[in-house]
Amino acid sequence: MNATEADLVIVGSGPAGMAAACEARTLGLSVVLLDEQATIGGQIYRNIESAPVDRVEILGQDYVAGRSLAMDFRSSGAGYLGGAVVWNVSLDGTVDYVAGGHSQQLVGKNVLLASGAMERPFPIRGWTLPGVMGAGAAQILLKGSGALPTAPVVLAGCGPLLYLLAWQFLRAGAKIEALVDTTEKSAYLRAARHGVGALRGWKELTKGLKLLSTLRRHGVRVYSGSHGLAVEGETRAEAISFTHRGRSVRIPASLVLLHQGVVPNTQLTWSTGAAHHWDSEQLCWCPVTDPSGRLGETPIYVAGDSRGIVGAQASAVQGRLAALAIGDRLGITTNVGRRAELQSQLQRYTYIRPFLNALYRPADENRVPQDPSVVVCRCEEVTAGQIRRYVELGCLGPNQTKAFGRCGMGPCQGRFCGLTVTEIIAQARGTAPEDVGYYRIRPPVKPVLLGDFLP
Amino acid sequence: MTTDALFTISQKSKPELITITFDGKALTVPAGISVAAALLVGGVHEFRSSVVGQVPRAPFCMMGVCFECLVEIDGVPARQSCLVPVRDGMVVQRQIGAAHLDEGHTGEEA
């Protein structure tokens, strides 16, 4: 295997990764950035370099903001490898990846993991049927291919991305059959109580409400405070059913887009053996780092949403701060003023987060399915009822569910069931997610073919 | 592109079109998109059948984390079709159950 060295190897070309590369280059560090997608930008700025004008207009200002960062990254002098799938990160800074059908290595004096976020699992009856996708997935289809739902679509769940996608669909001329909003009434109260500068919080709240009223004005049926969601169908989605204001509603739909927020993609940090803590506000695992994002005493740093959900702007700043810390470690004097400037930016961008966490906290019933027939592990088809049964038989945590019934052992390696399994077991045992823990994630974190190792 | 497809790409922008096959059936799809996107706009509903229950599955995340979009591409099984850019002449097959290697893939030819 052909090893190449760099001061900094970055995994992920979203805002955190690109900004970190730019900042590190300013310090004179040699940088190589790897990303498994074919284009730069991560998910938030996907296809930012080649999306046609009309599509960019549909996607809106927050998307356009990625352009200047992408341009800065391109002119930064950082090396970039697209279509490079990282399958191992070692504590000595070795990064193994597959590109073009060959496994290769890079050795970083430092490594920054910026693998971003993924949509939170939405385990309800029927969520494995063809025709049920994440709202984020549909947005990726729009950003990457300009593809829109053919028939009137149903959006269901909660969170800013769901409303944003609805707004983008309307601008693009796609028809929305209904928006099934699972935000609980209590969420508004909980958020309002949060004491985040009242004005800022109010602005965010009214932004969401304004979007909802825009949707209604366009004739979209909005079902607020819905619960008991299920997708019906034999071999593909045929309808969504739910309870709204005490009444059962059934809406025929061939495409149902689910969303209830995003969670850190922690596969790489877990695989390094790093400690993680349960974030009881964001209801997910986050790697334990120092303030600069460093994992323990390792040369590995984490920035952006894969460290805890902070959003695109804050992610970029975290990337830059990690680059400064790495510069320090390499003995390069950094400008104290720059760090202070970035820290105040970070504070500004994350100020609203606790409020958003409270407002868009996904409902318990949509995270911890009570219906025993709901599939939790999509790959190995293990249900909520089976997992509860394992607990009755003495199963204490996610790792043991593997032995009981192959839960989490399919190709996604627990990415789409891990959080649910942790919470189901915690509830069944009457203990905290922190006590239950997570799967032991081991490399390769992505499938590798034996043929990839042939010269 | 069939009207039955879950997603449609507007032809107004006159995208360059290429041809791939899915289970032997020719699909004309825009160039420059992922295989998963191409199959979705090409009217494919079932990408694979699940390993345990043999029930139909299709892409869920479109970003490389859910592994629901696994298909066989040009003879290589279990490829994440949302991560592979589509190419003219690509031969794509539905992935039935778990990935397996047939006699043609003993490693000798690789």
Image (cartoon, coloured by chain):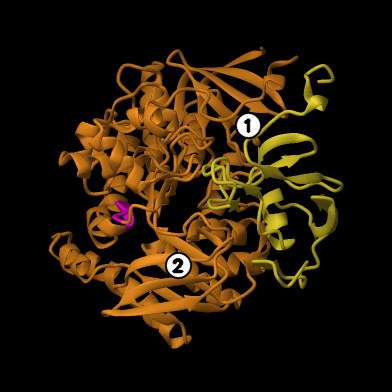
Chain colours: A orange, B yellow
Viewer can see residue A286: yes
Identify which amino acid the numbered label 2 is placed on.
Answer: Leu
Residue plotted at (57% across, 77% down): A152
Image quadrant in which the N terminus of chain A is located? top right
Chain designation of label 2 = A
Q: Upstream in the sequence, badge 2 or badge 1?
A: 1
For residue A350, above or below residue B16:
above
For residue A373, above or below residue A343:
below
Residue plotted at (22% across, 40% down): A426
Viewer can see residue B34: no
Please tell me which residue lies in front, A15 or A437.
Answer: A437
Residue extent of the magenta highlight: A366-370
Disc 2 designates what residue?
A164
Marks 2 and 1 close (CB-CB < 8 Å) = no
For residue A218, above or below residue A319:
below
Q: Position of residue A279 (x, y in %)?
A: 24, 42
Image quadrant in which the C terminus of chain A is located? top right
Disc 1 designates what residue?
A84
Most frequent secondary structure within the magenta stretch: loop
